[in-house]
Image: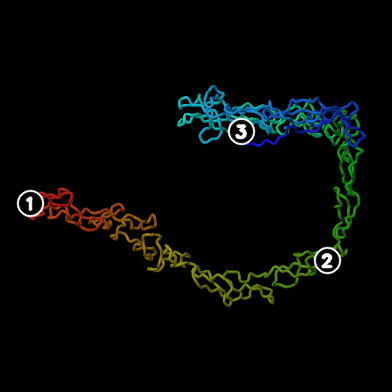
């Protein structure tokens, strides 16, 4: 049994009598509208006086118009400015069950079951008797039904039940829906409530997402525990809105054009300002705030909230700190005009300096000889020392007086880098006497022994110098090398490698179906086969297939094979399959004396029964009988 703990009288809000908040007191509260004085108590009237002070007066005692919950045996009343709940025996909740008596008890609503068998009405024009359905302890109006009339007899017009007929017991069954939105229900927008099914009954529950809309962009629409909030508190300052052509909320629930200057036109120029929540234009011709110094222009307000950028040739551009230019304005265009004044780039090695093209770029020239091809590589100007004793640039030409080291160049102030030997030396040709001789200043010395050379012969591979003569060894041709080409031996007369390889040297003809390949008169010829071919077993696909490089070709038709069956003889291959021969190893079916000499494939012998009606001679007297299904010779 449910236990109700609600007292007969309890306070749900604090009430006040008439009060005034002092401007000077610790509870100071200024106001301009009654909304600012709202204390959230429905039992007080909240006012804002003409001097900006809030006051509150208790409303007359009695029930409140909003917030009552039907059927909870309670009533919300205002008493002395406070909201209280008092017991109300007349606020009875109808549980919708005609088999219960509904009343209010000390703890709240009570539903008392009527005795079983009491006549009842299910509320939809159907009569029945009170009792509990099978498997239930809840007493309800049990309506009789059949499969034929279930659709009308069991319809309780309740969207929160699924109605059917228990044909076995001839009684209507109404399965309650629970926890879902009432099917087909019309919800009321903005009432902070949602109609749902609760244990088969339509129930309104709090839905704080179903907020009321007061039509004001600058207030908050909300629900509090399923009740619309009548206060509609204002949104914060500068919240976006579009009521009445405004754009920003003023923080007091009104949509206005502006709250500060930044919301009027270009905030950087301040040619439009916000006054009294309205954007107004600055005086025409006044200087705007958005100036760009030194740009040959001055920005002025145009009296319509905009600005104009006007030419001002006295607003010279800032100095570029370049002595080779002069700052000027020309009809609003800033410029740094080049001059031809004397200048100093603080360098020793480029002589006297003059401005040109806006830079200190004209110079009298280098005072030092620098790299000049002699043996001295330290004649370059040194800026740090203001002298001509610096190292010439690396790779500058010089001369060290030697013949056999070729062209000379400077490196780190010395004539020490040389291009190499001026003579060809060992250079791969047939002349092995091309090495440099310093004593003779010529290139006629013998090249080093084993130096690479070329003796002019095609059929020698490795040519080397020996005491000034080029001698060759080896061959450039592969010769017999096991591939399919049997004409790779060197021919000096032809300067090629197309001579026939020696007969019987190994080669490969590139064919899968030949086994042993040998050269013969320059041609690679293969013999033998890598595959077994027809070999009398059950596999008739062991012949070589050149196109597939395998041994899975069909053996020749008629090749002998073995199909693995005892009862066939004379097996032969046909299109890759071993077919059983027409022969039979057993006498069977031949008018012999007995009827059990046919072939038995399972036992691999000749003990199977002969076919019915096979001629037989059991008495061996030439009077033939016939075999029956039991393997006996009858009518003999």
Q: Nearer the viewer, mark 1 or mark 3?
A: 3
Above or below: residue 47 compared with residue 524: above
Mark 1 secondary-structure assignment: loop
Q: Pointer 2 and pointer 1: residues touching (CB < 8 Å)?
A: no
Q: Is residue 501 left or right of residue 202?
A: left
Q: Which mark is residue 390?
A: 2
Q: Position of residue 477 (x, y in %)?
A: 48, 67
The front one of 159 and 263 is 159
Q: Nearer the viewer, mark 2 or mark 3?
A: 3
- Residue 427 visible (yes or no): yes
The front one of 91 and 407 is 91
Which numbered disc flags the more N-terminal residue, 2 or 1? 2
Q: Position of residue 68 (x, y in %)?
A: 71, 28
Which numbered disc flags the more N-terminal residue, 1 or 3? 3
The answer to which image quadrant residue 480 occupies is bottom left
Q: Name the residue carrying label 1.
A: 623
In whole angstroms, how far apart are the C-alphas of marks 2 and 1? 143 Å
Q: Position of residue 153 (x, y in %)?
A: 50, 24
Q: Is residue 329 left or right of residue 426?
A: right
Mark 3 secondary-structure assignment: strand
- Residue 256 visible (yes or no): no
Q: Name the residue carrying label 3.
A: 198
The answer to which image quadrant residue 569 occupies is bottom left
In whole angstroms, how far apart are the C-alphas of marks 1 and 3? 101 Å
Q: Residues within 10 Å of mark 1 (few under 14, many from 20)?
A: few
Mark 2 secondary-structure assignment: strand
Quadrant that contains the N terminus: top right
Q: Residues within 10 Å of mark 2 (few under 14, many from 20)?
A: many
Judged from this view, the residue extending furthest toward the top is 125
The front one of 268 and 342 is 268
In whole angstroms, how far apart are the C-alphas of marks 2 and 3? 103 Å
What residue is at 81 percent from the left and 66 percent from the top?
391
């Amino acid at each position: 049994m449910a236990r109700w703990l609600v007292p007969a009288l309890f306070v749900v809000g604090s009430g006040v009598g008439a009060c005034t908040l002092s401007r000077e007191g610790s509870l100071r509260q200024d106001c301009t509208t009654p909304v600012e004085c709202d204390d959230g108590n429905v039992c007080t009237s909240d006012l804002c006086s003409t001097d900006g002070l809030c006051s509150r007066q208790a409303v007359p005692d009695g029930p409140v118009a909003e917030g009552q919950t039907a059927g909870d045996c309670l009533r919300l009343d205002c008493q002395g400015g406070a909201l209280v709940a008092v017991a109300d025996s007349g606020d009875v909740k109808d549980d919708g069950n005609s088999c219960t008596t509904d009343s209010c008890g000390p703890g709240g609503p009570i539903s008392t079951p009527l005795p079983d068998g009491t006549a009842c009405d299910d509320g939809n024009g159907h009569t029945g008797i009170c009792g509990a359905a099978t498997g239930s302890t809840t007493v309800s109006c049990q309506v009789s039904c059949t499969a034929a009339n279930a659709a009308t007899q069991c319809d309780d017009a309740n969207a929160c039940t699924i109605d059917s007929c228990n044909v076995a017991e001839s009684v209507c069954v109404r399965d309650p829906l629970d926890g879902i939105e009432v099917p087909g229900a019309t919800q009321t927008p903005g009432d902070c409530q949602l109609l749902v099914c609760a244990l088969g009954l339509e129930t309104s529950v709090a839905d704080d997402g179903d907020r009321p809309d007061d039509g004001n962009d600058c207030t908050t629409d909300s629900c509090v525990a399923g009740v619309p909030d009548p206060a509609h508190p204002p949104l914060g300052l500068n919240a976006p809105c579009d009521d009445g052509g405004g754009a920003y909320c003023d923080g007091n629930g009104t949509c206005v054009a502006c709250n500060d200057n930044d919301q009027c036109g270009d905030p950087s120029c301040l040619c439009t300002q916000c006054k009294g929540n309205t954007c107004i234009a600055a005086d025409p011709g006044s200087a705007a705030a958005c100036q760009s110094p030194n740009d040959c222009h001055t920005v002025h307000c145009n009296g319509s909230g905009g600005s104009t950028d006007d030419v001002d040739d006295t607003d010279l551009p800032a100095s570029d700190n370049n002595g080779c230019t002069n700052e000027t304005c020309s009809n609003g265009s800033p410029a740094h005009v080049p001059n031809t004044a004397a200048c100093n780039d603080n360098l020793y090695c480029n002589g006297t300096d003059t401005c040109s093209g806006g830079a200190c770029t004209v110079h009298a020239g280098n005072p030092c000889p620098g790299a000049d091809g002699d043996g001295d590589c330290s004649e370059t100007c040194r800026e740090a020392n203001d002298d001509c004793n610096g190292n010439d640039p690396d790779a500058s030409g010089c001369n060290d007086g030697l013949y056999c080291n070729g062209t000379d160049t400077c490196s780190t102030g010395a004539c020490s880098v040389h291009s190499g030997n001026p003579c060809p030396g060992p250079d791969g040709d047939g002349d092995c006497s091309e090495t440099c001789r310093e004593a003779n200043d010529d290139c006629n010395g013998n090249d080093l022994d084993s130096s690479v050379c070329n003796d002019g012969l095609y059929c020698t591979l490795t040519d080397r110098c020996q005491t000034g003569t080029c001698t060759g060894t080896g061959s450039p041709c592969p010769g017999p090398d096991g591939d399919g080409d049997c004409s790779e031996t060197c021919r000096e007369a032809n300067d090629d490698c197309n001579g026939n390889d020696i007969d019987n040297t190994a080669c490969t003809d590139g064919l899968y179906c030949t086994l042993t390949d040998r050269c013969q008169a320059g041609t690679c010829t293969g013999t033998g086969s890598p595959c077994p071919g027809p070999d009398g077993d059950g596999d008739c696909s062991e012949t070589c297939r050149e196109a597939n490089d395998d041994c899975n070709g069909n053996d020749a038709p008629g090749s002998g094979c073995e199909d693995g069956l005892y009862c066939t003889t004379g097996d032969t291959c046909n299109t890759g399959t071993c077919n059983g021969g027409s022969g039979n190893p057993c006498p069977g079916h031949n008018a012999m004396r007995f009827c059990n000499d046919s072939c038995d494939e399972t036992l691999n012998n000749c003990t199977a029964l002969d076919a019915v009606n096979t001629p037989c001679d059991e008495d061996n007297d030439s009077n033939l009988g016939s075999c029956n299904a039991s393997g006996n010779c009858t009518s003999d």
